[in-house]
Image (cartoon, grey):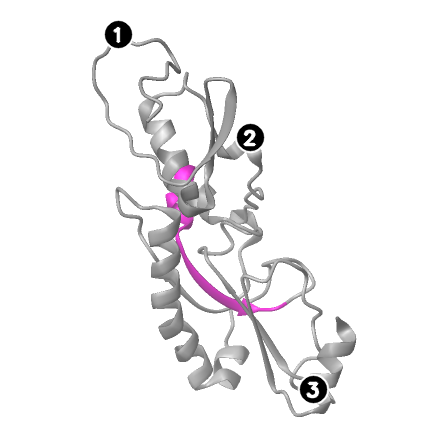
């Protein structure tokens, strides 16, 4: 809340860093104003592509060009602030939400440290995002996580990799399951769509 931001500044806080926080963080007064502070956000896409609360599944399923890390100024608009530093993270062919998140965490530390090494300079030299290239990725819902047995193997594989340890959803028999590990293999068979071959 705004009250907490002011209390932290009063106590001497000079920088606020947001990363993966699921709510809007109030923007403090700018550092060149009285009682101001730097406020930056760490985002797991190559902004302005991939704005949104959880862009990773969309990146894996259909937007590999947005794969990357961005450190940007915190603004009133979500993920719209000027960019201090960025790094592209080309996807591996078998990339999952878990491997991508690990790469973001690993490379993100270095990127953030780079910006923090001379924050006033990076802040002053930040570049505006190109709004003509901006995209907002949807917050994943149950429909996005749902594997349908009429889908092709590639599409099922992408959903499984995009949700990994978060779980995709599958109807098996008459029940709905959350599935946290799903591997696919293409091959010829004569089984019916969605037929359960084993309950073990």
Q: Nearer the viewer, residue 67 or 184?
A: 184
The residue shown at (31%, 46%) is: 95
Determine whether 174 is above or below 166 in the image: above
Q: Nearer the viewer, residue 74 or 160?
A: 160
Q: Secondary structure at mark 3?
A: helix
Residue at mark 1: 190
Residue at mark 3: 9
Determine whether 80 is above or below 72 in the image: above
- Is the N terminus in the top left, top right, bottom left or bottom right quadrant? bottom right
Disc nearest the viewer among 2 and 3: 2
The residue shown at (44%, 56%) is: 46
Contact, mark 3 vs mark 1 (Cβ under 8 Å): no
Contact, mark 1 vs mark 2 (Cβ under 8 Å): no
Q: Residues within 10 Å of mark 1 (few under 14, many from 20)?
A: few
- Is the C terminus in the top left, top right, bottom left or bottom right quadrant? top left
* Chain part drawn in magenta: 61-74
Disc nearest the viewer among 1 and 2: 1
Q: Residue furthest right?
A: 3
The residue shown at (32%, 24%) is: 153
Looking at the image, residue 77 sits to the left or right of residue 70; the answer is right
Image location (x, y in percent) of residue 78: 63, 57
Q: Secondary structure at mark 1?
A: loop
Q: Residues within 10 Å of mark 2 (few under 14, many from 20)?
A: few
Image location (x, y in percent) of residue 73: 58, 70
Q: Considering only order in the chain, which callout, 2 or 1, is on the residue closer to the N terminus?
A: 2
Determine whether 65 is above or below 87 in the image: above
Q: CA distance from mark 3 to mark 1?
A: 67 Å
Residue at mark 2: 143
């Amino acid at each position: 809340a705004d009250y907490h931001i002011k209390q932290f500044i009063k106590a001497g806080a000079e920088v606020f860093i947001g990363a993966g926080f699921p709510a809007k963080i109030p923007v403090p007064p700018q550092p060149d104003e009285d009682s101001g502070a730097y406020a930056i956000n760490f985002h797991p896409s190559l902004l302005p592509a991939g704005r949104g609360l959880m862009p990773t599944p969309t990146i894996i399923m259909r937007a590999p060009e947005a794969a990357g890390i961005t450190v940007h100024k915190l603004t009133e608009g979500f993920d719209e602030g000027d960019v201090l530093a960025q790094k592209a993270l080309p996807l591996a062919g078998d990339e999952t939400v878990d491997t991508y998140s690990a790469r973001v965490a690993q490379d993100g530390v270095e990127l953030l440290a780079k910006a923090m090494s001379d924050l006033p300079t990076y802040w002053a030299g930040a570049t505006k995002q190109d709004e003509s290239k901006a995209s907002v990725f949807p917050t994943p819902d149950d429909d996005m996580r749902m594997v349908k047995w009429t889908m092709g193997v590639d599409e099922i594989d992408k959903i499984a990799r995009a949700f990994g340890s978060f779980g995709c959803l599958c109807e098996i028999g008459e029940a709905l399951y959350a599935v946290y590990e799903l591997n696919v293999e293409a091959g010829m068979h004569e089984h019916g769509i969605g037929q359960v071959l084993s309950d073990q």
